[in-house]
């Protein structure tokens, strides 16, 4: 899948509609997205319990993919609302590279609506994946932090934007293959004291899982009792 391609919704989701219009199709709506557009979003309904990789619809709930069954990742569980397909992909690209922060409110709201129905206890804390200070200074915001704030507000969960740090600048993961991604991120994160706590680590996209695995390992080293890996979308 060519994740960098502009999809048919890119103009609409880039500009965003008026407050009484759906941000995806532009038709009249009482919320940020109309019922039809929400229904047609690429929801990640059948996924690996440990890394959120989309699985066949016949797979039992709570199952793991073959990779996680053979070598479980550091996190205890993983969840993403969507697969990385249009129009979610355009919303995330516009959020990350073009400062379209309204996408964080829309996607964070949709994620919160879905998470609010879960039967298991909510995490005590949301920790967004940090940017290196140089990249944060250049971009002006952390896209994961923007989504985390919306989720925290809607779910009444504290968001710890300053708890984690990226120790060193790393290369853009999109340019690297799986083994290079793991090497690129080794030892890159530092997480503050989370001893005995149930935390959700939040990123915009989980691609190979290398970033989240390294971040989860740092959280485990800092004493987290239970670690959930959350993201807006999961690459297939």
Image: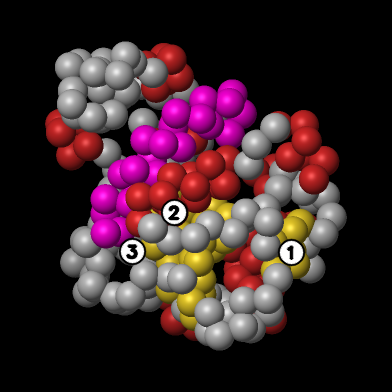
Circle nearer the N terminus (1, 2): 2
Q: Give neighbour class at mark 3: few <14, some 14-19, many 20+ (Cα, 10 Å).
A: many
- SS class, disc 2: helix
Judging depth in this view, the residue of 226 and 193 nearest the camera is 193
Expressed as whole percent of the image width and height from the top left, the position of residue 142 reads 63, 42
Residue 216 shown left or right of residue 103 in the figure: right
Whole-Å distance between the Cαs marked 1 and 2?
22 Å
- Residue under numbered circle 1: 189
Circles 3 and 2, Cβ within 8 Å, touching? The answer is: no
- SS class, disc 3: loop
Q: Is residue 70 magenta?
A: no
Judged by depth in the image, the label closer to the viewer, 3 or 2, is: 2
Circles 3 and 1, Cβ within 8 Å, touching? The answer is: no
Judged by depth in the image, the label closer to the viewer, 3 or 1, is: 1
| Residue under the point 20% across and 16% down | 27
Numbered range of the magenta stretch = 95-116
Judged by depth in the image, the label closer to the viewer, 1 or 2, is: 2
């Amino acid at each position: 899948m060519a994740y960098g391609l502009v999809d048919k919704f890119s103009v609409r989701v880039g500009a965003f509609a008026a407050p009484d219009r759906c941000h995806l199709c532009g038709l009249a709506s009482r919320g940020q997205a109309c019922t039809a557009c929400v229904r047609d979003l690429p929801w990640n309904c059948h996924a690996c319990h440990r890394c959120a990789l989309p699985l066949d619809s016949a797979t039992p709930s709570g199952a793991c993919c073959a990779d996680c069954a053979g070598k479980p990742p550091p996190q205890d569980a993983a969840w993403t609302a969507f697969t990385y397909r249009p129009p979610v992909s355009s919303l995330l690209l516009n959020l990350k590279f073009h400062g379209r922060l309204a996408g964080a409110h829309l996607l964070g709201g949709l994620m919160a609506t879905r998470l609010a129905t879960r039967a298991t206890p909510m995490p005590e804390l949301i920790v967004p994946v940090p940017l290196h200070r140089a990249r944060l200074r250049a971009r002006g915001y952390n896209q994961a932090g923007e989504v985390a704030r919306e989720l925290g507000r809607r779910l009444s969960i504290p968001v710890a934007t300053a708890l984690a740090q990226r120790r060193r600048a790393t290369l853009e993961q999109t340019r690297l293959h799986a083994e290079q991604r793991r090497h690129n991120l080794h030892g890159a994160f530092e997480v503050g004291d989370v001893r005995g706590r149930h935390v959700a680590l939040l990123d915009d996209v989980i691609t190979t899982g290398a970033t989240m695995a390294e971040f989860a390992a740092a959280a485990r080293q800092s004493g987290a009792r239970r670690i959930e890996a959350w993201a807006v979308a999961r690459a297939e």
